[in-house]
Image: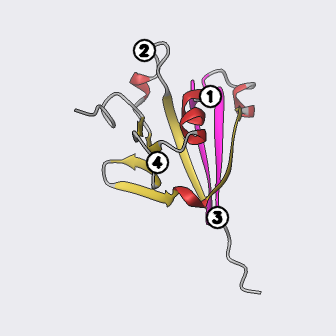
Amino acid sequence: MSTFLQDKCYETANTYAACIEFRFDENHRRAFNASQLIEFSLDPNPDADADKNEPPQKITLVFSTADVVVLGWRLGLIADYLRGNTLTAVCILPKRYADLERNAIYVSSIVITPIAKNNG
């Protein structure tokens, strides 16, 4: 049985992932077709320099219709799953899970910003 949304903040597929879903809670989801992913980058979170309570890492995903920013700890494995096209879902977990397992991925924030349509 999957522990997604219980104590794990990501899900993967054994083969190709058709879409990547972002879950904010049990009732709010947004998904993008994996073929719309243009690029992604894993970077240090610049806000973590000033505030040590801020997540140290940031993954930015650029889709054709929106940008998605995921903040958290130990996000390198999510980047690996993106590269392998097997990431199917990402969710936010409560703060109590952040240090539950030293090597576990923890996502604290997901922000989706739609790309503005140019009606020019």
Number of the label disc, if any, that sits on residue 101: 2
Q: Position of residue 109 (x, y in %)?
A: 53, 40
Q: Which residues are magenta?
A: 53-74
Q: Nearer the viewer, residue 114 or 64?
A: 64
- For label 1, the SS is loop
Residue 66 lies left or right of residue 44; in this view the side is left
Q: CA distance from mark 2 to mark 1?
A: 18 Å
Distance from Cα at disc 1 to Cα at disc 3: 28 Å
Q: Residue furthest left?
A: 1
- Numbered disc 4: secondary structure: loop
For label 4, the residue is: 16
- Find residue 97 and report its image quarter: top left
Earlier-in-chain disc, 1 versus 4: 4
Find disc 3 in the rendering and name its residue.
64
Quarter of the image that includes the N terminus: top left
Q: Nearer the viewer, mark 4 or mark 2?
A: 4
Q: Amino acid at mark 3?
A: Ser
The quarter holding residue 54 reads top right
